[in-house]
Amino acid sequence: MVDLDVLASLHGRSMLLTRDWSRAELDALAALAVRFERLDRAGRCPALLPNELAYAVFFDNSTRTKSAWAGAAARLGMHPVIVDGSSTQVAHGETAAETGAMLGMNAHALGVRHDLILGEGNRFMRELKRGIDDYLSAAGESRRVPVVNLQCDVDHPTQTMADLLWLRERFPEGLAGRTIAVSWAYSPSYAKPLSVPQGLVTLLTRMGAHVRLAHPEGYRLMDDCLADAARFAGESGGSFDVVDDMDAAFDGADVVYPKSWGPWDLMQERVAANRAGDREALADIERRALERNARHRDWICDERRMGLTRDALYMHCLPADIGAEVSPGVMERARVDVAREANKKVYVIMALLAAAKVPAERLAALWEEA
């Protein structure tokens, strides 16, 4: 069962960063997601939000998150609509607040992915939310339109909450005392955002885990994320360490999460080039980022490194660069596990939408259903 008062406090809430929510609120959200999963697998998932519009805008590519948004909305009885961000008027000068007002007047929930440019994605979402709320207030509407961060420059909340659900299923006794390695890994494909590792270290340190962050020199994360991870670890009885050695991170680990992200200085350069609309500069930054990555081809999760662990659980947000981030053999053994990990995102999104829009008493009744 879940605490009804905590569940009630989630009504009308948006999730823009997991750091915005208390530990009790995150636990309530997770409990609701687990309940939705059990009901869904029993074929008894109720359509709590019929005839409502669940709109999602993606300014970057996606497979799993688009599918999870559509699947979650459909299970709740909503009508999911997913659009490419380039088809909006943002590139033509429309502000985030204006976009929010235009979408909020018709949508009942809004998901956004805006993850490639440091300092822009989460700020865009907050401005968009302000535009929605200002419009609803001016129109005298009591309707709530929650905004769900489907990945920004700072965090990927639906992914990391899905990861937490998977970890809790695999370690039902809890994560306190478990050692989790969040490591950079080589990728030849593109300079990936920093949001997944940042979201992981700022969430898992709240659960009492011993989190090790590993990356080569030059691949640091945002200062505020590192500071919060250290603070959360101190508060939860866990620990947070940053190392420059993948082997050291894997040594004795219970869980490993090897994932590539872009070099810090080039991710900063991308900000100015994007603001200037300089496509040639953006292409050059991407080329240099991949060249930088190639200096660290030995940062791979392979059988030797897995042998350093305590038979660790391999995790990834997918898609993994097989042969670069992870060896084919390790990935093949984890293939079903990472798919099950990915599927948790459907239920996280269901829980976010339902908690924001359905009275807590109705949600509490879900625990009484077979």
Image: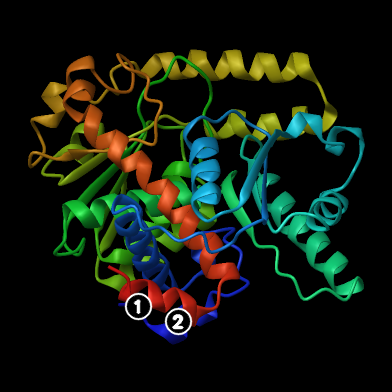
User: Which residue in the protein does label 1 denote?
Assistant: 2
Q: Where in the figure is residue 145, as x and y percent of width and height? A: 70, 63
Q: Please say if the residues under marks 1 and 2 sit with CB atoms less than 8 Å apart.
A: yes
Secondary element type, mark 2: helix
Relative to residue 177, is residue 67 depicted above or below?
Answer: above
Residue 107 left/right relative to 216: right
Given the image, on which type of amino acid does mark 1 rest? Val
Residue 11 left/right relative to 33: right
Q: Quadrant of residue 298?
A: top left
Q: Residue at x 47, y 40 (%)?
A: 220
User: Which residue in the protein does label 2 denote?
Assistant: 6
Disc 2: CA contacts within 10 A as few (<14), some (14-19) or many (>=20): some
Q: Residue at x 84, y 38 (%)?
A: 90
Of tags 1 and 2, which is closer to the observer?
A: 1
Q: Where in the figure is residue 328, as x and y percent of width and height? A: 23, 15
Q: Where in the figure is residue 4, as x and y percent of width and height? A: 42, 84
Camera-side residue: 57 or 227?
Answer: 57
Inter-mark Cα distance, 1 to 2: 8 Å
Relative to residue 278, is residue 66 depicted above or below?
Answer: below
Q: Residue furthest bottom?
A: 5
Is the C terminus in the top left, top right, bottom left or bottom right quadrant? bottom left
Camera-side residue: 67 or 202?
Answer: 67
Q: Is residue 200 visible?
A: no
Q: Where in the figure is residue 225, as x and y percent of width and height? A: 49, 55
Relative to residue 63, is residue 143 depicted above or below?
Answer: below
Q: Residue at x 29, y 65 (%)?
A: 207
Residue 253 left/right relative to 30: left
Relative to residue 59, is residue 324 depicted above or below?
Answer: above
Q: Residue at x 34, y 55 (%)?
A: 37
